[in-house]
Image (spheres, rainbow, N blue to C red):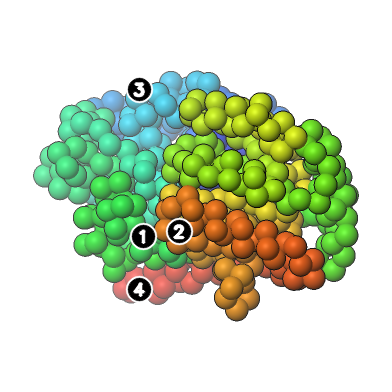
Amino acid sequence: MNILFAASEANPYIASGGLADVSGSLPQAIYQKGHDCRIVIPLYKNIPANLKASMTFLTHITVDVAWRKQYCGIFTSICKGVTYYFIDNEYYFGRDGIYGFYDDCERFSFFSRAVLEMLRYIDFKPDVIHANDWQTALIPVYYQVFYKYQQGYDKIKSVFTIHNIQYQGNYGKEVLSEVMGIPLYHTSLLEYDGAINMMKGAIETADKITTVSPSYAWEILDPWYSHGMDRALVNKQYKLCGFLNGIDVDGYNPETDEIIAANYTSKSIKNKKVCKAALIEEMGLQEGDEPVIGIVTRFVSHKGIDLIRYVFEDLIKAGFKFAILGSGEKIYEDFFKEMQWRYPDKVSVSLGFIPELAKKIYAGADMFLMPSQSEPCGLAQMVAMRYGTIPIVRETGGLRDSVKDYGDEGGNGFTFKTYNAHDMLNACMRAKEVFGDKRKWNRIIKRDMEEDFSWSNSAELYIGLYKELANSVED
């Protein structure tokens, strides 16, 4: 099968978050299973020069952006066997940064239209176009409105993946004709709550809608999680499903990782103690066998930081030490800095995102805390388990799908259900109790390290979905 994966970012070229990990890894896994999966992203100014040097210019075309005609260059490159296409326009993408510009609606309307126009000029006809998040949400809309019945565009199916429903692409109604160029009689496809909502358009027009975990797929039908999109999704839930993301098991491998203090495997975990000792020394914590809780996150409310604040000193009194890495809202940064000042031998806080330190925390901590209010998939808990660090999580989204409570059969972590600080505290105390029994604790470490969170599993599920769509095409 031929699949075109459209996204606003992808590793190794450009990244701002988890979407780039998915875009760089999932097509690779699908390609390795014998399918021609290609990727298209914008050609941003911030793509490193050495990667730009490897690109080949294919052609240039013009793309309609409402009443404008804009230049569009098409470049290509191959990375690990997978073909990448790059949509070039200096006006839209020759800037520092990826998102957050006043004309993002116009930039990604151009990109979505350019992806479909590109198909006339490349030697590749996809069976399925897989669009991701609001930045590419107009691809299935444009296909239905303009391309469905054009020669060469017949029988193309579309999948739209919601990575985070909070970001929907909301704009005033004027963008419909002034920016998107969509006839007013199609207003109902995109109109939602008195505005134009790009994600809603994809929900209406895509053949299948997916999310990044099974639990998140049904959670977003609930107003608590949906950021207002539940009413649109409830009517389309017959085409909604969720597949758990994977992680890069080669990049996160305690057996070969050169950044951590010592390598270890599930068969021989004694060097994990070496990593713990190195982490304690580097972060200036008090030596000793007390459990170290690792936290690597953004300091924002939906990550559950409020729960941590509420019982933080109770956890300190219970004998926990903390290795914390992250950045975000100032109120939370200030809180963690104050805790470090008050308990310098128990709490170490590093502000920012430092990938090398993150790996040292994954390898050196005993437990990893993620009390999220909502979590579409979450990768940190899987990475922690890969390094034998036991997750303590709230049962939501991908956390529920990847972590089973120790009290259940095959339990690989400690969980709590309600968004409540003392329930989280109770889960931590249960973890500490089991931590005191080294035989039981080592058994969980080995079980976690042997979990399969590779992209291969996700790829199989997506391939099944693509085949279902391809087989549904009427001859």
Q: Is residue 426 visible?
A: yes
- Which x, y percent locates residue 298? 54, 37
Label 2–label 4 contact, CB within 8 A: no
Residue bearing mark 4: 472
Q: Is residue 173 above or below residue 36?
A: above
Question: Alpha-carbon distance for marks 2 and 4?
Answer: 33 Å
Disc 4 packing (10 Å; few <14; some 14–19; many ≥20): few
Q: In the displayed structure, would residue 303 be above or below residue 392? A: above
Query: Can the viewer see residue 452 in this picture?
Result: no
Residue displayed at 55% across by 26% down: 334
Residue type at numbered disc 1? Glu
* Number of the front mark, 2 or 4: 2
Q: Secondary structure at mark 4?
A: loop
Residue underneath mark 3? 102
The disc, 2 or 1, on the residue closer to the chain's N-terminal end is: 1
Q: Quadrant of residue 51?
A: top right
Disc 2, disc 1: CB below 8 Å?
A: yes
Disc 1 secondary structure class? helix
The one of 410 and 176 positioned closer to us in this rendering? 410
Q: Work out how far the residue at label 3 is from the one at label 1, CA to CA, in angstroms.
A: 31 Å
Residue 42 placement, left or right of 135:
right
Disc 1 and disc 4: Cα gap in Å? 28 Å
Q: Which residue is mark 1?
A: 219
Residue 310 point in image, percent of width and height = 49, 42
Contact? badges 3 and 4 (CB < 8 Å): no
Residue at the disc numbered 2: 396
Q: Earlier in the sequence, mark 1 or mark 4?
A: 1
Earlier along the polypeptide chain: callout 2 or callout 4?
A: 2
Q: CA distance from mark 3 to mark 4?
A: 40 Å
Q: Nearer the viewer, mark 3 or mark 1?
A: 1
Q: Residue furthest left?
A: 185
Q: Are marks 1 and 4 in contact (CB under 8 Å)?
A: no
